[in-house]
Image (cartoon, rainbow, N blue to C red):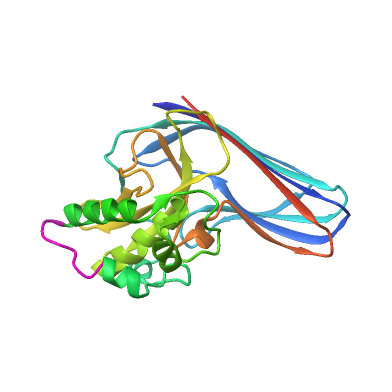
Amino acid sequence: MRLKVSHRTEYNYDQPIRYGLQRIRLWPASGPAQTILTWTLQVEGAREEVRFLDQFGNDTRLLSIDGDPHTISVVVVGEVETNEVSGVSGPHRGFAPLWLFQHETPLTAPGPAIKALAADPGEGGELERLHRLMAEIRKRVAYVPGTTDTGTTAEQALNKGTGVCQDHAHIFAAAARLFGFPARYVSGYLMMNDRVEQAATHAWAEAYVNGLGWVGFDAANGISPDQRYVRVAVGRDYREAMPISGILVGQAQERLAVHITVEQ
């Protein structure tokens, strides 16, 4: 399947900025599940200082901002050929060792609720147990936008019983690690069946299964990623894979607007 992605992020400020630094992870890589046909990145109001592959193998760029103008925009547009691989993205790559993905983070630290969720992995093979975990998370945590934010932990979301794809991915990663699997967070895009325009990127989780490599599980939709998915960045949680993050020095008030389209 060939997908076209357009993602525009625009920051508006009410006064000049003394200094700002943004880190962007918006450049996907080709792999077993996808081939990048074209991909462009345009930045206005900031300048690229350096680009590198981070410890997880993500294409990472640092942008600096100072003074005028009052608007900064980051736009990516590209076409991707996706393949049906049943959610298997292949062997482990990157500078970070595999064992690092068995370690918890502040957003994925298991509390009593997640420990109870992972207390009985049940019978069956590794894939069967992971699919059962995905289904249980989807049953317990309803998809309700606005009930959590980027600082909500996996434990908090599970106790609340509502959340978004970020929360589903965090809960899955936390529980899968208790099962003994290396697990990670994936940031990317999903072509929706009922609409082209979207308000945010998508997220899901992957667990490392011996003999297969990394296998994806999207508890928000109850499936392993298929040809409608485009993977961009990975990390142990949202903070390590988030598309754009940064710091701002000064008193300027920020307004953020995001516009995303994903279509065949």
Q: Is residue 12 above or below residue 245?
A: above
Determine the residue located farthest toward the left in the rendered image. Answer: 123
Query: In the figure, is residue 175 to the left or right of 127?
Result: right
Question: Is the N terminus in the top left, top right, bottom left or bottom right quadrant?
Answer: top left
- 11 on left or right of 206: right
Residue located at (23% from left, 51% from top): 131
Residue 134 magenta-drawn?
no
**Main SS category, magenta section:** loop
Horizontal and vertical percent position of residue 159: 40, 66
179 on left or right of 260: left
> Does residue 159 sit above or below 3 in this rendering?
below
Q: Residue at x 35, y 47 (%)?
A: 218
Residue 110: image location, x then y, percent: 37, 72
Q: Write the residue at 40% across / 55% down.
A: 168
Tell me residue 242's x, y (percent): 54, 55
Q: Give, as a single range, the part of the protein colored magenta.
A: 118-125
Q: Nearer the viewer, residue 220 or 98?
A: 220
Kindly tell me whether residue 91 is visible in this rendering. Answer: no
* Nearer to us in this view, 134 or 214: 134
Q: Quadrant of residue 86?
A: top left
Q: Is residue 72 visible?
A: yes
